[in-house]
């Protein structure tokens, strides 16, 4: 099960749980997501990273997220004109209240374009 949010549905993200604490999230790129330089907007890429990172923690039975982002760091390694982006995120360390998670985002040629990490607060 994944977090159910109207915003994610609006963006048409697709989810796959790859292990108990890791996920793959795919985002089809629409013209609306392209900046004035002709590249995918950094805010869209950051959103994909955060969605993937938060989904490393399973939601409750109603699909509500159990962890919120306390800190998010996004590093853009390469610009992209890809038609789809894929985020692969996993929990690195789970403590009592804090979870450290990492994410890599790939373009449609399987090049890493972004790396992200987050500290999540488990409610």
Image (tube, rainbow, N blue to C red):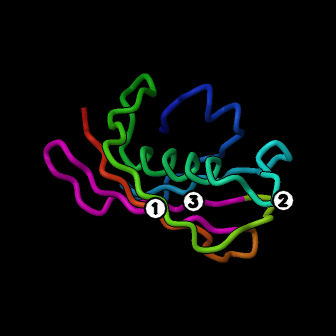
Element carrying mark 3: strand
Distance of mark 1 from mark 3, alpha carbons?
A: 10 Å
Residue with the mark numbered 1: 116
Task: Indicate the quadrant containing the C terminus: top left, top right, bottom left or bottom right.
Answer: top left
C-alpha distance separating marks 2 and 1: 22 Å
Q: Is residue 107 left or right of residue 55?
A: right
Q: CA distance from mark 2 to mark 3?
A: 21 Å
> Residue farthest to the top?
62
Residue 111: percent from left, percent from top = 66, 77
Left or right of 108? Residue 62 is: left
Number of numbered callouts drawn: 3
Q: Is residue 2 left or right of residue 21?
A: right
2 vs 1, front mark: 2
Q: Which residues are magenta?
A: 85-107
User: Foreground: 27 or 42?
Assistant: 42
- Residue at screen point 69% across, 50% down: 27
On screen, residue 68 above or below 30: above
Instruction: Give the residue drawn at x 57%, y 59%.
Output: 87
With 99 as the anchor, is 46 left or right in this view?
right
- Find numbered disc 2 in the image and state the secondary structure of the residue it sits on: loop
Residue ID at (64%, 60%): 86
Q: Where is residue 101, by image quadrant?
A: bottom left
- Kindly give the residue lying farthest to the front in the view shown: 36
Where is mark 3, residue-wise? 87
Mark 1 surroundings within 10 Å by alpha-carbon count, few (fewer than 14), some (14 through 19), many (20 or more):
many
Q: Residue at x 70, y 38 (%)?
A: 11
- Disc marking residue 38: 2
């Amino acid at each position: 099960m994944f977090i159910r949010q109207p915003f994610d549905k609006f963006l048409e993200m697709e989810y796959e749980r790859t292990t108990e604490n890791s996920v793959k999230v795919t985002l089809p790129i629409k013209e609306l997501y392209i900046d004035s330089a002709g590249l995918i907007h950094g805010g869209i890429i950051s959103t994909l990273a955060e969605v993937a990172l938060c989904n490393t923690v399973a939601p409750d039975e109603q699909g509500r997220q159990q962890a919120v982002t306390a800190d998010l760091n996004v590093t853009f390694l390469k610009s992209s004109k890809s038609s789809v982006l894929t985020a692969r995120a996993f929990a690195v360390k789970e403590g009592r209240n804090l979870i450290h998670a990492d994410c890599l985002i790939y373009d449609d040629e399987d090049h890493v374009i972004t790396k992200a990490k987050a500290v999540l607060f488990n409610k």
